[in-house]
Image: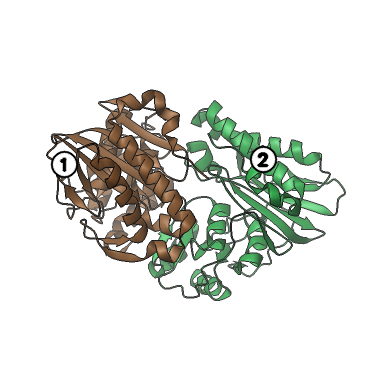
Chain colours: A brown, B green
Amino acid sequence: MTRPVSALTRSSRHELHPVLLAAADAAQRTYLHARAAHSRAELEAVIGIGADGTPTMYIDDLVETAILEVSAAHGVNVLSEEAGFIDHGSALTLVIDPLDGSANAAAGVPLACFSAALAEENHFTQALTRWLDGNRQWAAAHGTTVGPEPLRTTGRSDLSGAALSLLRPQTANRSAWDRLSRQAGRVRVLSCSTLESALVLTGAVDAFADPGGDVHRLVDLAAAVVLADVAGGCVLDAHDRPIELDLDLTHRWSGIVAATSELAHAVQAQIAG
Amino acid sequence: MTRPVSALTRSSRHELHPVLLAAADAAQRTYLHARAAHSRAELEAVIGIGADGTPTMYIDDLVETAILEVSAAHGVNVLSEEAGFIDHGSALTLVIDPLDGSANAAAGVPLACFSAALAEENHFTQALTRWLDGNRQWAAAHGTTVGPEPLRTTGRSDLSGAALSLLRPQTANRSAWDRLSRQAGRVRVLSCSTLESALVLTGAVDAFADPGGDVHRLVDLAAAVVLADVAGGCVLDAHDRPIELDLDLTHRWSGIVAATSELAHAVQAQIAG
């Protein structure tokens, strides 16, 4: 029922490397078809372990396969969640989360995204996150917003009363989760990191965090790094590890995406305890 | 960018009272226009206190006003969040949440719904919940699903490992929230009760609950009562108060919407402590 949104941003397409839009279109087409053609049990069946060390669902594999087919034609290197690093000898590396929010996607919770960032040499310069269930996407290239969705945070610096999005509470993050949720004015748990990051960077939410659980992979955070630069936001790791191109997808971060550097550091301080 | 979905279900329109579709179309049109035409600050400005005793935002008022205009032509009584009970001397009463997820709607988190149930004399017989940000709606009339979205729960009875949606943690529900989230396999907080109910009743989530905070009004739960009857789900109040037509919108419930009666009672037991 939802069509790929690239038609909406045709006037700005030239600002993004075409591989970003081609990959997003392939992801969205495949996702929508998979949701229509397969049962939940089929979509969430685990078919292996990806390069990131986590289980690969059938729906993850369908979407990634479609993306790799179209991106191969563009000759860029690809670092993707399940397949790992595919070296085409290019100076450009596309870092992709083919289907962020896989559990939502397989179950039928309409919160799943394609998200990718393009690194030139080792520096992220372009990014596109597309919400696959609705006609919205967020993109930036070389410090400029691309497309109709403005990127600007709320500018909030105070954690007390802030609207937070958090990874779901689990054993490894429970105490930090409790500290953050008690200070927040509102907490959401959407189970889709790249969407939650985009909501911070459009000013819908003040901050998003993995509260110290070390769940985030580079593919969950790379687009936010580029979009935050345009939006005036801040992306940190809870333990101050740099968020930069790294070809080992088993590495983990506890990402914090916030409206301001002050708010990001306030969240970081609560995670430290 | 998103158009009202009634065209998608034209073949089934005759099964729903036309006031439900007219009201949903008015809500969606007004919501999408308001999001495009106004800033977040304008949309979330509090302009008064509604009949339900909670603050009315400007966006709530815009959407409800549009709904009341179209529903007046149908001659049914209306019970709506801000306006309260409007008596047209009809045997039919439309119980409406014009804009569920107002905080999401004003901020720009794409999780807001129109939701309504129609009571014949005092019995709810028809309902329609429409997700205003995407082309999906869930409807039933006289024990039958209306439209393309199937209504069927996961059938899960075991709370341990279940996928739960919960109202956000607050002081009044914190201990029950902690008990439930520790038993759950996955927790989401979407801040849109009627959407979260619909996700239970389509089998995307196992259960949704207000963990004893007495936050739910009749308008948050009425559609779920009708949809659950078709989906094989169960709608309970945590304190066993009946969920039935009640013209006093200051009354509150702690709603539980679950895949099965067993799961609903397991959630209820955790809320009781």
**Place of residue B126 in the rendered image (x, y in percent of width and height, measured from the top left):** 72, 57
Q: Mark 2 belongs to which subunit? A: B
In the image, taking residue B15 as reference, residue A10 lies left or right, namely: left
Q: Is residue B65 left or right of residue A154?
A: right
Front-lying residue, A239 or A178: A239
Residue A104 image offset from top left, x and y in percent: 42, 55
**Residue B15 falls in image quadrant:** bottom right
Q: Which residue is mark 1?
A: A245
Q: Which residue is mark 2?
A: B25
Depth check, front residue: B139 or A74: A74
Provide the secondary structure element on which disc 1 rests: loop
Residue type beneath disc 2: Asp
> Is the residue marked by circle 2 packed among few (<14), some (14-19), or many (20+) residues within 10 Å?
many
Where residue A6 sits, quadrant-wise, is top left
Look at the numbered disc 2 and give the secondary structure of its residue. helix
- Res B36 visible: yes
* Residue type of the residue flagged with mark 1: Leu
Pick the residue in front: B128 or B269: B128
Which residue is located at x 32 percent, y 41 percent?
A23
Identify the residue at horizontal 58%, vertical 67% (top origin): B238
- Decide: few, some or many residues near mark 1? Use Cα within 10 Å; few <14, some 14-19, many ≥20: many
Q: Where residue B157 sits in the image (x, y, percent)?
A: 50, 75
Q: Is residue B47 above or below residue A113?
A: above
Q: Nearer the viewer, residue B215 or A4?
A: A4
Q: Residue at x 36, y 35 (%)?
A: A201
